[in-house]
């Protein structure tokens, strides 16, 4: 599903964020992207939803080179991807239901239909009762679940989460991860950038380590090949 | 952008208009003032043009005939003049008719003519020229051809007044476009600033819309719609304000407007004029927002 071929990203003048990354992620995989701060986790995610362009190399998503997309193509790409951020990025003026339904309305789904979908998703994530609340009246965990619901409204094939538990206490972080596991059951590919080692140990099925912009380790692949337990 | 996305754009635009209503009202007010000033000059120009047309309809050439002209020669001359392509109609004014007209024109002071012989005035032709030949150079040429007739002693027509009024109309039109142009330019930037404020207020929303796959058109459309609504509202306000001002002048003032006459004789803009003001308002709003969006979102994304 996702292939990185010798991908590098350099920010001017000469700050190397990623260097010669080669990796492949299959459909339905749950991947943790980890490494110390500045390792390039966020940059790698940004390359995937084309917030950044690679300086070198190719990124293929379902066989399509996403480095060559026009602005219209980028918009189309993002409609297939759900995004979750550490700081939730919810709109305080809108209700929970409106926040969740926004990505659907943007692509032309009727208000009625998008609200229906949003309401169902909120039900799955245990937030149906709070559909009319404003995001700022919710707890951090609830806000993150709203953000996750928003990322799922258009049935994406890929969900990218950048430090989704960074602002949450351990118990809520655990709940959030269980939500991600539920998402995986739908067959959605999940890539979660995190430096929460405990969480990764508990939930990580495949762990990609980045260090100073380079791919330092890819644990699942190693495990599959039987070289490491 | 597809039709199914239109309701979303309309909802976003109306929500933006509600949330920044004072800013939008201020911008609409500024646009309305610009359009009002422009409309005032349109009104002035259209009334002057109406006057010019009225004068043009009344314009006639007086060809005074030689005194010794026999009736046969006069009939021949009348036939020749009638056959000229410029002529709409000709009336022959006899010496007696001219005398009666002159006395009537003098009214109570007509006794000054007592003692004068009734054939003191020459007979003449009052020639009404077809509208397509009323332009100054054509009139000059026609008058010159009439003068070539031996039996015509003098040719007179009020071209000077027409020329002066035409010049005044042209002057008003120039002032309208120059002053209007400057005001439009200022308004254009004011609209741009409002859109900039709206973008700043919606920065987080724009960012999220970009992240969830909104096309550029979809992100820009609500702001452009806001600009167009502002412009149309401003145009409508300007038309109503002009109409109100004219009505007030008609009711409350009885001064003479110079060559235009008293306010109660002034005409309001026709449908085309009103539509032009609305269209200009709409265009100002549209162009101001598109310009600002392109410039501001590009700068913001680059930063």
Image: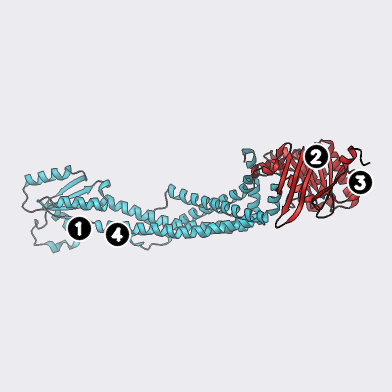
Chain colours: A red, B cyan
According to the picture, the residue beneath numbered tag 1 turns out to be B105
Residue for point 9% across, 47% down: B74
How many angstroms separate mark 3 from mark 1 (CA)? 114 Å
Q: Residues within 10 Å of mark 3 (few under 14, many from 20)?
A: few
Q: Are marks 4 and 2 on the same chain?
A: no
Q: Are marks 4 and 3 on the same chain?
A: no
How many angstroms separate mark 4 from mark 3 (CA)? 94 Å
Residue for point 75% across, 46% down: A7
How many angstroms separate mark 4 from mark 2 (CA)? 84 Å
Nearer the observer: mark 4 or 3; the answer is 3
B159 or A179, which lies in front? A179
Residue for point 49% across, 50% down: B278
Dot 4: what SS? helix
How many angstroms separate mark 1 from mark 2 (CA)? 105 Å
According to the picture, the residue beneath numbered tag 2 turns out to be A25
Residue A84 drawn at (x, y percent): 78, 47
Taking the image as drawn, is residue A50 in sight?
no
Which quadrant is home to the C terminus of chain B? bottom right
Q: Chain of mark 1?
A: B
Q: Chain of mark 2?
A: A
Nearer the observer: mark 1 or 2; the answer is 2
């Amino acid at each position: 599903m996702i292939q990185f071929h010798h991908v590098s990203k350099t920010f001017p003048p000469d700050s190397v964020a990623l260097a010669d990354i080669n990796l492949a992620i299959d459909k339905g995989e749950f991947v943790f992207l980890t490494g110390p701060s500045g390792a390039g986790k966020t940059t790698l995610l940004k390359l995937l939803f084309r917030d950044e362009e690679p300086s070198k190399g190719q990124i293929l998503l379902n066989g399509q080179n996403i480095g060559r997309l026009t602005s219209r193509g980028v918009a189309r790409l993002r409609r297939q991807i759900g995004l979750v951020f550490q700081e939730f990025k919810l709109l305080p003026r809108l209700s929970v239901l409106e926040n969740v339904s926004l990505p659907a309305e943007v692509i032309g789904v009727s208000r009625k239909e998008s609200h229906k979908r949003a309401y169902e998703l909120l039900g799955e994530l245990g937030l149906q009762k709070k559909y009319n609340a404003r995001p700022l009246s919710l707890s951090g965990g609830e806000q993150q679940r709203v953000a996750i619901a928003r990322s799922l409204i258009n049935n994406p094939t890929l969900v990218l989460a950048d430090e989704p538990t960074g602002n949450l206490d351990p118990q809520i972080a655990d709940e959030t991860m269980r939500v991600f596991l539920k998402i995986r059951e739908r067959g959605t590919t999940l890539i979660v950038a995190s430096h929460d080692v405990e969480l990764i140990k508990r939930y990580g099925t495949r762990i990609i380590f980045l260090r100073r912009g380079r791919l330092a380790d890819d644990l699942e692949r190693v495990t599959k090949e039987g070289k490491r337990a | 952008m597809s039709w199914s996305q239109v309701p979303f754009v309309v909802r976003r635009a109306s929500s933006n208009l509600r949330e920044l209503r004072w800013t939008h009202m201020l911008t609409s007010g500024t646009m309305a003032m610009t359009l009002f000033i422009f409309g005032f000059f349109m009104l002035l120009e259209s009334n002057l043009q109406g006057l010019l047309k009225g004068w043009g309809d009344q314009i006639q050439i007086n060809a005074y005939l030689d005194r010794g002209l026999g009736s046969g020669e006069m009939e021949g001359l009348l036939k020749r003049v009638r056959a000229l392509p410029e002529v709409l109609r000709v009336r022959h004014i006899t010496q007696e008719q001219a005398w009666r007209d002159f006395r009537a024109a003098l009214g109570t002071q007509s006794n000054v003519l007592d003692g004068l012989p009734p054939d003191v005035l020459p007979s003449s032709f009052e020639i009404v020229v077809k509208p397509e030949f009323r332009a100054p150079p054509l009139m000059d040429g026609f008058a010159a051809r009439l003068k070539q007739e031996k039996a015509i002693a003098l040719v007179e027509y009020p071209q000077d007044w027409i020329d002066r009024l035409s010049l005044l109309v042209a002057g008003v039109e120039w002032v309208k476009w120059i002053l209007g142009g400057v005001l439009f330019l200022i308004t254009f930037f004011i609209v741009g600033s409002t859109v900039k404020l709206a973008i700043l207020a919606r920065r987080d929303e724009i960012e999220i819309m970009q992240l969830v796959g909104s096309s550029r058109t979809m992100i820009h459309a609500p702001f452009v719609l806001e600009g167009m609504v502002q412009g149309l509202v401003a145009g409508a306000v300007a038309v109503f304000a002009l109409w109100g001002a004219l009505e007030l002048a008609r009711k409350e003032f009885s001064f003479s407007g110079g060559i235009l006459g008293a306010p109660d004789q002034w005409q309001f803009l026709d449908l085309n004029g009103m539509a032009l003001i609305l269209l200009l308002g709409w265009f100002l709003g549209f162009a101001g927002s598109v310009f600002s969006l392109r410039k501001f979102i590009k700068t913001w994304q680059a930063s």
